[in-house]
Image (spheres, rainbow, N blue to C red):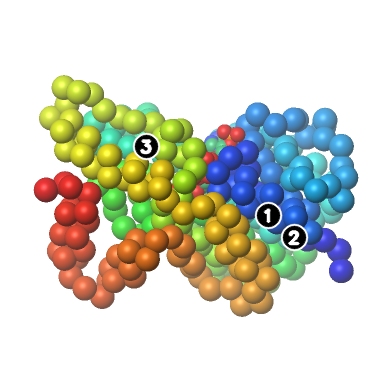
Amino acid sequence: MDKKVILLTGASSGLGKSTADYLTKKGYIVLGTSRTAAHPDEIRIDANTSFPLMIKMDVTSEQSISQVISFIQKKFGRIDILINNAGWGISGPIEKTSIDVTKSLFEINVFGMLRVTQQVLPLMRTQNQGLIINISSIGGVIGLPFQGLYSASKFAVEGISESLRMEVSQFGIKVVLVEPGDFKTSFTNNRKKICSSSSTYAQLLKRTTTVFEHDEQNGCDPILLAFKIEKIIRSSHPKVRYRIGSFSQKLVARIKGFISDKIVQWILMKYYKVK
Ligand SMILES: NC(=O)c1ccc[n+]([C@@H]2O[C@H](COP(=O)([O-])OP(=O)(O)OC[C@H]3O[C@@H](n4cnc5c(N)ncnc54)[C@H](OP(=O)(O)O)[C@@H]3O)[C@@H](O)[C@H]2O)c1
């Protein structure tokens, strides 16, 4: 059987890079995207490459996405798997985060994922098969203090993915959510930090940020996510969602809905030193 063709957004670093490298080693044809890679026209195709083929794409640009998809369609004729991984974070008080900054976050995490998905779906429909894996977060199931707008963007990813899964199942297309806990990547450094030392939130923000940045920088190895993704790809009946991270993070996400919201909030506020 021909090698499966994978389009993986945000493959230049962190979870995306690790997954792209691993899947390539496993024999998949991985087209990884980055805003700084070579333009599609400059890419030379070697289906036996031992490295992911990196292509320039910005998920905030409709045109950039369509160039990449027509390039892949021309060269390979199909996209078997789409992994929407490109993402960005913001930390800071919701009250102090401007609407413009919030919009730029949603442009990547929500509309970026949606743009790529909407452009890949027609091809997957004609193939009568496809798998879309959307990288959400445990923060997409639980509202995290001082990462509220990031959480909001991942809650949106969750809602879109759950609905889309039902809509496209008739075409043989599967939609899966992956919810990572803390992983050690460049996400912490790349995140936009909204803070001002004069802010009424300054002290609390510093305490909470210290906790989650420490957890991220001591988080899981990205290769674990790559293993999980490969398992999902090989599964003939993938589940709606897969959670991956430390035991305690997965546990809190799991008990939400079973125990009182007040208790969940108490646990989170204690853990993140919000009280
Ligand atoms: N690390 C964690 O603890 C964690 C936990 C839960 C969920 N996640 C999610 O996992 C995903 C990957 O994060 P990461 O930890 O690997 O972060 P990362 O190391 O900062 O990587 C982010 C990736 O997204 C790409 N990207 C950013 N903006 C983009 C844009 N406008 N268009 C196209 N690509 C863009 C970057 O590529 P270029 O800059 O090269 O374009 C980079 O490859 C994100 O969706 C994140 O929300 C991470």
Q: Secondary structure at mark 3?
A: strand
Q: Amino acid at mark 3?
A: Ile
- Residue 73 rendering spot, x and y as whole percentages: 81, 49
Q: Secondary structure at mark 2?
A: loop
Q: Secondary structure at mark 1?
A: helix
Tell me the residue at 78%/53% (across/down).
29
Q: Amino acid at mark 2?
A: Lys
How many numbered marks appear? 3
- For disc 2, the marked residue is 26
The tag earlier along the polypeptide, 2 or 3, is 2
Can residue 89 be seen from the camera position used here? yes
Tell me the residue at 34%/61% (across/down).
249
Is residue 240 depicted above or below 53 in this figure? Answer: below
Mark sitting on residue 22: 1
Q: Is residue 170 left or right of residue 95?
A: right
- For disc 3, the marked residue is 90
- Residue 195 rendering spot, x and y as whole percentages: 26, 28
| Residue closest to the eye, 217 or 111 | 217
- Residue 170 rendering spot, x and y as whole percentages: 64, 73
- The image quarter containing residue 125 is bottom right
Q: How far apart are the two marked residues, 2 and 3, measured between alpha carbons?
A: 34 Å
| Residue closest to the eye, 121 or 200 | 200
CB of mark 2 within 8 Å of CB of mark 1? yes
Q: Is residue 220 left or right of residue 248?
A: right
Mark 3 closeness class: few <14, some 14–19, many ≥20 residues within 10 Å: many
Q: Is mark 3 within 8 Å of ligand 1?
A: no
| Residue closest to the eye, 79 or 194 | 194
